[in-house]
Image (spheres, helix red, strand yellow):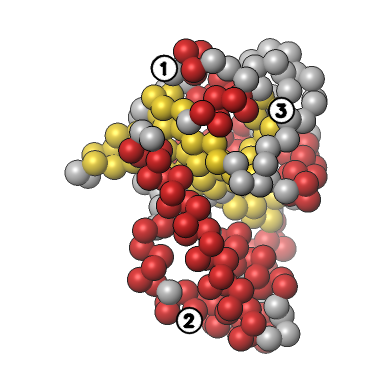
Amino acid sequence: MRNNGYISQVNYPIDPDDFLISRTDINGYITYANPRFIEVSGFEIEELINEPHNVVRHPDMPPEVYRDMWATLREGSSWQGYVKNRRKNGDHYWVHANVVPVMDKGELQGYASLRSFASEEKVRYFENIYRQMREKTCPYYVKRGQLKRRGLRGKLSSIQWEGVKTRLMVASFASVMLLGGGLAVTQHFALGGLAAGCVGASVGRVGVWCQCLAAGLAESLGALTKGYRAAVGGR
């Protein structure tokens, strides 16, 4: 994995309404970076364009996370995950990254990436998870951007369902189907985390949960679509 040099372990905070956008060619070399990404990275635009995107890679990121990202993208699917990036001066910043293949007339043209704010809770959680991955003690592995539990417990958790959880999952599927027409524009972005968050907050009432899902999807559709259009259009 590329070594980008000195690290300070000083966090550079980004704002909840920040969007860091970039685009690369099919080999991962940067062809576009929006002003906020340039500012947060600490590099000059000339130091980013035509450079590999891993110029901002932080050594605390486990290699298997990036292997999963590239394997997912090469399947033609989108990838999402929490990423710790390195600034030019050795500081770091955390983001929630969404990466999508850019296609034109059926041909892969490159990749567009939209990075947004990561909460302190998520940062603490993934700092611990990634430390365990580096130490080879983590009970999880990454598959298409999602954490999966290793071993028999992970296999059983995918097939054993409590009654309430089953009803909630059925309700979520029904609500997504009702919103299907509006979801087409985000077919490349991973939104699974939204559903998981809503389920945790609404175990008691399916109706309230469905409203939460609809509101969360509507809000994210606008933000992700805006960022994706800016990346693809070079704006």
Percent x, y of residue 103: 29, 42
- Going from N to C along the chain, the mark reached first, 1 or 3, is 1
In front here: 61 or 109? 109
Relative vertical location of residue 91 with respect to residue 230 in this rendering, above or below: above
Amino acid type of the residue that numbered disc 1 sits on in the rendered structure: Asn
Residue found at x 60% / y 52%: 146
- The reply to whether dot 1 and dot 3 touch (C-beta < 8 Å) is no
Quarter of the figure with residue 29: top left
Q: Which residue lies under the disc numbered 3? A: 92
Q: Which residue lies under the disc numbered 1? A: 50
Q: Nearer the viewer, mark 2 or mark 1?
A: 1
Quarter of the figure with residue 100: top left
| Residue 111 appears in the picture as rendered | no
Relative vertical location of residue 113 with respect to residue 164 in this rendering, above or below: above
Q: Which residue lies under the disc numbered 2? A: 174
Percent x, y of residue 230: 40, 40
